Image (tube, rainbow, N blue to C red):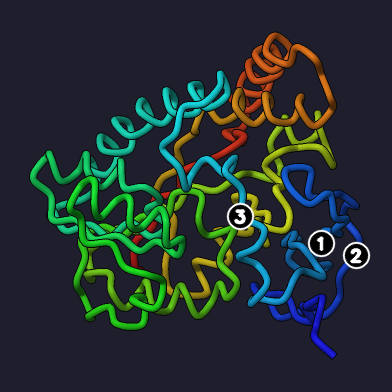
Amino acid sequence: MEQTEKYIYNCPICNSNQFELFLDTKDYFLTKENFKLVKCSSCSFVFTNPRPPDHDLSKYYQSPDYLSHTARKRNLKDFVYQYLRSINIRRKFKLVKQFGKGNNILDIGSGTGELLNYFKKKGWNVVGIEPNEDARKFAVNTYQIAIYDEKHLKKLKENSFDVITLWHVLEHVPDLNATLQKIKKGLKKYGYLVIAVPNIEAPDFYKYREKWAALDVPRHLYHFSPKTLSLLLENHGLTIIDKKPMLFDAYYVSLLSEGYKHRKIPYLPAIINGFVSNKKAKKNNNYSSMIFVAKQK
């Protein structure tokens, strides 16, 4: 009989087998299936459990509305996403340039390639890894960038990249520890790892709870906080040296979350709630989505 659920019996961070139910939610974006989030009783890591088996995960991305895999502009939400992405690309470049001392960059989960194309125009040597075939082909054909499927991670040469980035990718990765081992191998000794993830402790999570769009189950397998991401990276000999907010994410996540609440006109409450979230987050640097810059110890 084919497996329909995959249970995680040990915490990916601390290996504890003691969990408590954190939240009941569902895939509001696509299938409307129900899912559970559990919280590790030892280190407080939150993750989707059970989840679909690895070979079934791809079907949860098969939608024209999954925006990171498309460059289309069909409606107002698409335009908002594309506009914010263009601003974020410039900000990401400025951040990476601040830390990166060389010009070799690997972007894991490179989508349709707009970020790498920007780096390429600025004179960087760029390589991408993207599991989605359509997004990968679009990037290769449109921007003539070297972008490979996820199997390429195993082929990374040691000490190859000055910077490796994962923008809203780590929460999707089925095997966190194996992936981080491969990433660390490809990172130069004094290179930087840049990771952006949603923050399960953000004010807008507490506003929307099970309808918080950044849960995005089951595409998001893990739900990090600054503490749990730091613990995970420490396990791999990496330490966080800087944290940056992604201020626009609070607005965009609020917009999607308002849609899950079936608001007929979601834009005004999304703007208000995004503003409130960022204002509260400023007190303790606990924003809706955050960028973490890490390097080897």
User: In the rendering, at what x and y percent does residue 136 appear?
Assistant: 36, 58
Task: From the image, tell me which residue sits under label 3.
Answer: 62
Q: Amino acid at mark 3?
A: Gln
Kindly state the secondary structure of the residue where label 3 is placed. loop
Task: Please say if 100 is above or below 95.
Answer: below
Distance, label 1 to label 2, CA atoms, is: 5 Å
Decide which of tag 1 and tag 2 comes sooner along the chain: 2
Distance, label 1 to label 3, CA atoms, is: 28 Å
Task: From the image, tell me which residue sits under label 1.
Answer: 39
Distance, label 3 to label 2, CA atoms, is: 31 Å
Q: Is residue 131 left or right of residue 174?
A: left
From the image, which quarter does the C terminus lie in?
Answer: bottom left
**Of 267 and 39, the residue lying toward us:** 267
Q: How many marks?
A: 3
Task: From the image, tell me which residue sits under label 2.
Answer: 20
Q: Is residue 97 left or right of residue 174?
A: left
Evaluate if marks 1 and 2 touch, with contact meaning CB atoms under 8 Å apart: yes
User: In the rendering, at what x and y percent does residue 86 appear?
Assistant: 35, 28
Task: Please say if 4 is above or below 82.
Answer: below
The residue lying at 21 percent from left, 75 percent from top is 159
Pair 3/2: label in front:
3
